[in-house]
Amino acid sequence: MKNLLLILILLVMENTAFAQFTQEPLPYAFDALEPSIDKATMEIHYGRHHKAYVDNLNKAVVGAPQEKMSLLDLQKSITAETPAPIRNNGGGVWNHTFFFNGMAPKAGGEPKGKLGEDIKATWGSFDHFKEEFKKAALGRFGSGWVWLSVNNGKLVIQSTPNQDNPLMPVSEAKGIPVLSLDVWEHAYYLKYQNKRADYTDAYWNVVNWERSNDLYVKALK
Ligand code: MN
């Protein structure tokens, strides 16, 4: 009986260690971003794609230096030498959590505060900023991300391939992200099919600018 209890405790401990990285809850319902981002896309994107990145990351980090890192430190550890499953799934987990948290129901509109001011100062107008962001979204061949980041105190629009992000030393685009757009086909294909431009336009209806402004103010410090 004692042995059985010990085995059970060891199994629970092993399972806990295995699930080091967990999937953050979605901060709104699957249908909360309708009609801009549809319910079925959110269910599959969060429930299958994001979950798979978490599960696969937990398998990939076993025995690696990243095993005991925070998710943020893991991003900062990704070099050209990092095994692809850690780079791809580690980026996949962080990028999706960041992206999902960057949207909200009853959001959109124009950015306010310091971020709103500096977007206008950098691109002349919010409309021109949106044009440049869309160019980056359409210009990303295949799968990847578009970012609004802070680089050396300046706002920049960047794009990364696959699941890379500007926090990774391996990435050519470097900075502290304040906003992101997933331009993988799985992010929009069910509703928009091949029309990435329409998906990018609809994204502005659900951007949580308050959160981006908070990130921006922090990034400047
Ligand atoms: Mn995605």
Image (spheres, rainbow, N blue to C red):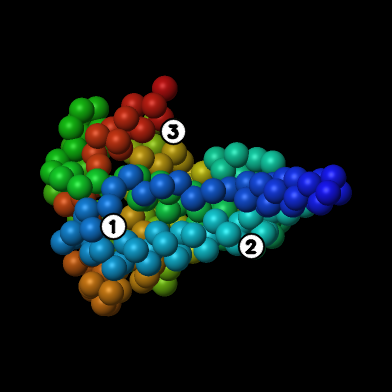
Which residue, as the protein is rendered here, is positioned at the far front?
1
Disc 1 residue type (three-letter): Phe
Kindly identify which residue carries mark 3: 152
Mark closer to the chain start, 3 or 1: 1
The residue labelled by disc 1 is 30
Which label's residue is closer to the chain start, 3 or 2?
2
Percent of width and height locating residue 75: 57, 46
What is the spatial separation of the Cα atoms under label 3 and label 1, in whole angstroms?
36 Å
| Amino acid of disc 2 | Pro
Horizontally, is 108 left or right of 2 in the view?
A: left
Q: Is residue 86 left or right of residue 185?
A: right
Of tags 2 and 1, the one toward the viewer is: 1
- Indicate which disc, 2 or 1, sits on the residue closer to the N terminus: 1
Query: Which residue is at the far right?
Result: 3
- Contact, CB < 8 Å: mark 3 with mark 2? no
Mark sitting on residue 88: none
**The disc labelled 3 sits on which kind of residue?**
Asn
Numbered badge on residue 85: 2
Q: Where on the picture, by quarter, is residue 55?
A: bottom right
